Image: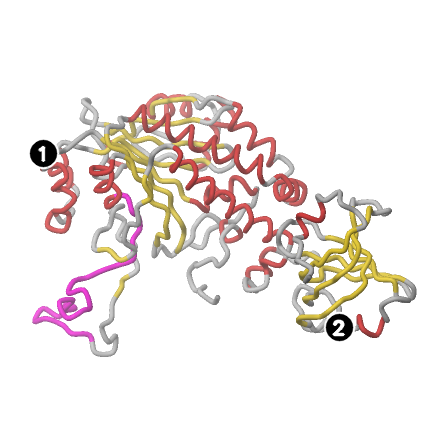
Amino acid sequence: MDLKRSLVKELLNSKEFEKEVLVKGWVRTRRGNKNIQFIALNDGSIVNSIQIVVDLSTIPEESLKLVTTGSCIQAIGKLTESKGQGQNVEILAKKIDIFGTADSETYPLQKKGHTLEFLREIAHLRPRTNTFGCILRLRHAASFAIHKYFNDHGFYYMHTPIITTSDAEGAGAMFRVTTLDLDKLPRNTEGKIEFAEDFFGKETSLTVSGQLEGELGAMALGAIYTFGPTFRAENSNTPRHLAEFWMIEPEMAFYEIKDNMDLAEDFLKYLIKYVLENCKDDLDFLNNMYDKELTERLKFVIDNEFVRLKYTEGVDILMKSGQKFEFPVKWGVDLQAEHERYLVEKHFKKPVILTDYPKEIKAFYMKQNDDGKTVRAMDVLFPKIGEIIGGSQREEDLEKLNKRITELNLPLKDLWWYIDTRRFGSAPHSGFGLGFERFMLFISGMSNIRDVIPFPRTPKNAEF
């Protein structure tokens, strides 16, 4: 009977000693002397490697010449209790086969201690490092938890379009989608591009949000969520910006702003509890290597009730704080990360949900309050990162929505389908958006958003 492959993760947790096992993976290190060699093997199932002990009287050293850092091998041997420090088990090798070699002179990961900046230049190989193995496993666990949470709470997963004609944010920084010949663009008598000849017969772009289409689903299914890629063509080279990123956007019929806040708090706490319970090895590694306060910060969120605070009160606290901010604070301005973090880390020492923002700094679809100045917006603020969720109760009143669209000079003709949902069976509804990479920054302790996505897309960077 053929020996079945075991994962390194399974073997490191095994107590079944003296049995024969088969393991496959990539060599992290090889060391030893003329009598015995030690190979650290990792297969991606866990951050830790398993040690393979090679007795050179059994396996000739000549056959190990191509077993170098980065090479891919399989080993058959006996699983035994380890006598060395740092591991509980090891494999006494009987046979080693090489799948793929890695030239020790040219393999970029031959040495340890590479900077994150260097690893971004070899994004095709960086998943093989401990750091990015942890990041990718965390992404998987968090993604699974997101789907599980919404499924268990009666939400339906809705796939909203990536190609769209609408700009949900009103930002205008969108990537254009076209099949037109860029060397021979058709133009009308006014010299403008004639998009009627394009593939879709009109101007189209990559989506910045699935929210507007998500609202359509909520008005039929009650509660939906989207989880997909979104795109912003902002020329921003900062540690917090990507041109391509993933968004989670639930939309719920019959939810008012308080219901929306309750959901956001419960959702975030669930996700953080999930990774704490299921990703201990990865979190411990990142905590020790990059952010000594990571685990403590994650527990801080789940151990505290979120403060609910109106924007006006928040601004008042900031103005009276005596703190010197880089960006001055006054009523009517959009708060910066330094302001948000002060409220969370210094003043309340708890996560904060800020509500009732000035109408003029928020999107057209947010429900207006009776004061005529503010809208039922909400931002969830976290330590270290500031805003992690943005959302609102949506404006369900047809007249108010039309008026706001007109005030902002948005194209009514392009939003007719969205407006129709207020014309036919309108209902109170709410929703929010969680940027997945921003959440990944928080749970990983990394400081640059390019290090929490497999292949970052930023200005002048689409190499892999």
Vertical placement of 42 versus 328: above or below? Answer: below
Residue 431 x, y percent position in the rendering: 30, 35
Q: How many marks?
A: 2
Q: For this view, does 331 lie left or right of residue 123?
A: left
Residue 171 spot, x, y in % from top left: 27, 49
Along the line of sight, which residue is nearer the eye, 428 or 167? 428
Which of pointers 1 and 2 indicates the residue nearer the eye? 2
| Picture residue at 49% right of the left edge, 24% below the top | 350
Label 2 secondary element: loop
Q: Is residue 195 magenta?
A: yes
Q: Could you classify mark 2 by the number of other residues whose Cα lies within 10 Å: few (under 14), some (14-19), or many (20 or more)?
A: some
Residue 69 location in percent, x, y? Answer: 72, 65
Q: Residue at position x 86%, y 71% from top?
A: 60
49 to the left or right of 245: right
Span highlighted in magenta in the image? 185-211
Q: Quadrant of residue 154?
A: top left
317 to 241, vertically: above or below: above
Looking at the image, is mark 1 or mark 2 earlier in the sequence? 2
Determine the secondary structure under disc 1.
Answer: helix
Question: Is residue 7 magenta-colored?
Answer: no
Front position in the image: 83 or 190:
83
Q: On residue 66, which mark appears?
A: 2
Identity, as a three-letter code, of the amino acid under mark 2: Leu
**Label of residue 399 in the image:** 1
* Side of 449 relative to 179 (left or right): right
Which of the colour schemes (rainbow, by chain, secondary structure, one colour) is used? secondary structure
The residues tagged by marks 1 and 2 sit, at their Cα atoms, a distance apart of 74 Å
Question: What amino acid is labelled 1 in the image?
Answer: Glu
Identify whether 277 is placed above or below 304: below
Q: Nearer the viewer, residue 166 or 275?
A: 275
Q: Main secondary structure of the magenta part?
A: loop
